Image (tube, rainbow, N blue to C red):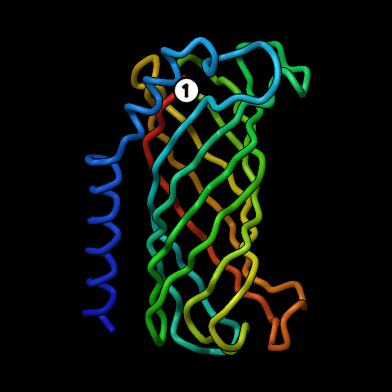
Amino acid sequence: MIISKQRFFCLFISLLAIIVAGSPLPAIAQTIRDNPDTGNSDRGLYLDELAVGTGYIRSSFQHGAEDLSGYPVFVRLGFSLNSLAGIRSGHKSLQLILEPFINPISAETDGVEAGCGIGLRYLHELSRPLDIYIEGNIAPMYLGIETTEQGEAGFNFLSQAGAGLRYRITKNNAIFGGYRFRHISHAGIMDRSNDGINSHAFVIGISWLY
């Protein structure tokens, strides 16, 4: 199992390196910033953040099985809801979040979590350039390992709530880190066990802002 965990650790590092070094995200961000038709607006919903992140997940199963560990790899798209929510201050922001992810995980067997979360993220400036944020999302997902709690591999929901800090390193770039509480369940819509899996995650990443 130690070898397996090392393999997954190498996998998530490799994926993150590919995403950051080779992805078009910075170019996309620059294109949107330079386009007056899709850039920041005082009205409606618009994309104001792209981010990539990773971290570490840890969970203890209820029924005595080997603990679960994992390495999240995700992309986050943040859409400003400020004008729709009546937020006019430049010191706070509300976002609609879309977050596709694929997380290598390891317990008694190895597998992945894969899905896409949708939720909200609220940021408040503590002192320039440091923001604090709280967030929550729910994701239809595929859990790729069999567990006593959730039965065979298959469809589940991943609910997450957390908080963290974002630090602007330039006008258009930031780094972030935070904690998330996670709960996996299929809400009773599948014909298998549903005791639920709780876990804790620490995440870090890079954002492109515009």
The percent coordinates of residue 105 (x first, y second) are 40, 71
The answer to whether residue 208 is above or below residue 139 is above
Q: Residue furthest front?
A: 37
The crowd level at tag 1 (other Cα within 10 Å; few <14, some 14-19, many 20+) is some
The percent coordinates of residue 199 (x first, y second) are 55, 66
Q: Which residue does the numbered mark 1 point to in the structure image? A: 130
Q: Which quadrant, please, contains the N terminus?
A: bottom left
Residue at (41% x, 58% y) in the render: 72
Residue at (34% x, 17% y) in the render: 170
Question: Residue 141 sits in which quadrant?
Answer: bottom right
Q: Amino acid at mark 1?
A: Leu
Q: Is 154 positioned to the left or the right of 82 in the image?
A: left
The percent coordinates of residue 3 (x first, y second) are 21, 79
The answer to whether residue 46 is above or below residue 188 is above
SS class of the residue under badge 1?
Answer: strand
The percent coordinates of residue 94 (x first, y second) are 66, 28
Q: How many marks?
A: 1
Residue at (46% x, 13% y) in the render: 35
Question: Residue 205 sits in which quadrant?
Answer: top left
Q: Is 145 positioned to the left or the right of 117 in the image?
A: left
Question: Residue 208 sits in which quadrant?
Answer: top left
Q: Is 201 positioned to the left or the right of 80 in the image?
A: left
The answer to whether residue 141 is above or below residue 160 is below
